[in-house]
Image: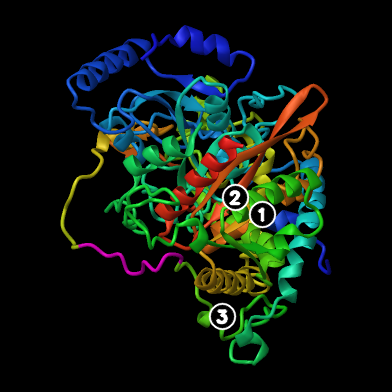
Amino acid sequence: MTQFSIKELQEKDQGIHAFLEFFDEKKIDQQIEESKKRIEQGNPLSAIDGKTVAIKENFVWTNGKTNAASKILKDFEAPYTATAVQKIIDAGGIIVGKTNMDEFAFGSSTENSAYGPTKNPHDLDRVPGGSSGGSAAAVASGMVELAIGTDTGGSIRQPAAFCGVVGFKPTYGAVSRYGVIAYGSSLDTIGTFGKTVKEARELFEVMAGKDVKDATSIDIENSKFETLNSKQAPHSKLKTQNLKIGLPKEFFAEGLDPRIKNAIDGVVEKIKSQGAEVVEISLPSLPYALACYYIIAFVEASSNLARYDGVRYGFSIENSKSKVTSRLERRDPSASLGMTKEGVGMTLLDIYQKSRAMGFGEEVKRRIMLGTYVSSAGYADKYYHQAQIVRQEIKKEFDDAFSKVDCIFAPVTPTLPFKFSENTDDPVKMYLEDVYTVPINVAGIPAISIPIETAQEGDKKLPIGMQILGKQRDDYNIFNIAQNIEDLISKS
Amino acid sequence: MNDKLDIEHIAKLSRLDLSKEEKEKYSKQMGGVLEYAEKIGDFRSPEQSEGSLHVGRDDKEGISRDDTSDVEVGVINGVTDAIREDEVGESLSRQEALKNAPAQKDGFIQVKGVFAEDE
């Protein structure tokens, strides 16, 4: 284990801004010492004992602040620690700090952070992706070995692809959501980043498991790592010549950058030459998946963010009043509108409306309003209930597909990492970056993004990722397949 | 998009105080997003096509009509009815719960009168 230094990390992060908060250096050093002892004695707590880990800023913990990259939670100190984070601590993982993200996880570029963007370590003029951009950049730049993030519509897989690292999104419910600041509760999934498939898997294993504090959490059956030609498993489904891979034609239609398509074709040729069968499949509901995702996600987001009201915690307009107005108000707490000084005589509605307007960023306000609209009386059937019907169909189509193939290969993103401000003028343009990732969240299935190639753009090499999808609860099989693809790529 | 977005109404429902300029800006941007979202209406599931599932068309008074209760919502990975025994377990202390409250008094979060003169 090399000597760890927060100062070095902070210097390295100057140019990237992956981190919003660093943990206490003395405590880190102590943890590293304890871990060293355990490993020397042959008693590591887990495979991640002693490894440095970064935590996305939407996981609450009692060791510092949590702000979900929003001003509305600027100095919020959570009174409890997220289950996923506690499990990492209990497993000996060395948490070094909290990483930058799009505010409340609303975004695909980390440009929506209220504390400034993060830069892609491969090209500082380009975004790292989002919303877990900080976590992806922290691993990609070597600042930490491991990181965790959340994936509601692609927020682990897309930044993983943009930053050239492995990003894993498990089956919905495989990791407890307790202590994760909620965006879309039926979509939010906690996952891992690592330089390699093995590392992403080891971190996942530590966090996985049913938690009584998360009513939708489940246990995923673990399976031993198997190589494709393992002698221990001669009849394994994962033996290359038994492997059947599906390529959804809807994912390889127009809109996909040809360099990404070619890179995936390259991997397909390699795996075919090993004996795997690759077939074209069709998931006809896929073109509706993006609209379906955004409607459901926005409705859930608007509901989940109602709690930020300037009353129970977080930023409040109440606290920004002058002393004069405070005195006036104490005399008549429920005085109505119409008084002159700002802050005087505010009603409860004012507290809500002004605190939220000041504390939330633009994209957050947009999504809250859109979610409110498409679930409001007169529109709920047309949008929200219709989206729920589409959701069930998408799930069915994936189920049907996985009865015919073992896994699906897909692109992660339609484009290479884009430049700052390239997509910020038009919300729909930004949303379209998620077209290959959102169907996975809609269906609740596991998926991993692995780096497969780079594309030359000027003097920079931009990473390209590929997704491997599996049916629900097939997480460990997906890791096995991904490991074998990783080996195959590194050999050539 | 048929209806002009009632941004006043939406902002009020969302509990967001917006300036006139902001209302115009958001209204335009949201219009674009909703135009994309409209395509969801083109989708017909097998049940819808055969007429066995009808998503009620919201009428002018904003009242949803029938059958939408048949629409399955929220079952993602098979878990339903995750109910525990009604037993007291661990919970936040009052002190912990009030830690971040902007205004508090006598162990309560302090809030403005709910029944104010005008709303």
**Relative image position of residue A349 (x, y in whole percent):** 56, 47
Using residue B44 as the reference point, say whether residue A321 is left or right of it. Answer: left
Quarter containing the N terminus of chain A: top left
Real-space CA distance between mark 2 and mark 1, rounded to the nearest whole angstrom: 9 Å
| Residue at image mark 3 | B68
Label 2 SS: strand
**Relative image position of residue A79 (x, y in whole percent):** 32, 34
Asked whether residue B82 is drawn in magenta, I would say: yes
**Amino acid on which the number 2 mark rests in the picture:** Gln
State the extent of the magenta-drawn residues as a range: B76-84
Write the residue at 68% across / 77% down. Answer: B61
Residue neighbourhood size for the residue with mark 3, other residues' Cα within 10 Å, grouped as few (<14), some (14–19), many (≥20): some
Q: Are marks 2 and 1 in contact (CB under 8 Å)?
A: yes
| Residue at image mark 2 | A467
Q: Are marks 3 and 2 in contact (CB under 8 Å)?
A: no
Name the magenta segment's main secondary structure.
loop
**Amino acid on which the number 1 mark rests in the picture:** Tyr
Observer able to see residue A439: yes
Real-space CA distance between mark 3 and mark 2, rounded to the nearest whole angstrom: 35 Å
**Amino acid on which the number 3 mark rests in the picture:** Thr
| Residue at image mark 1 | A436
Residue neighbourhood size for the residue with mark 1, other residues' Cα within 10 Å, grouped as few (<14), some (14–19), many (≥20): many
Real-space CA distance between mark 3 and mark 1, rounded to the nearest whole angstrom: 29 Å
Q: Quadrant of residue B5?
A: bottom right
Write the residue at 62% across / 29% down. Answer: A114
Is A4 located above or below residue B19 in the figure?
Answer: above
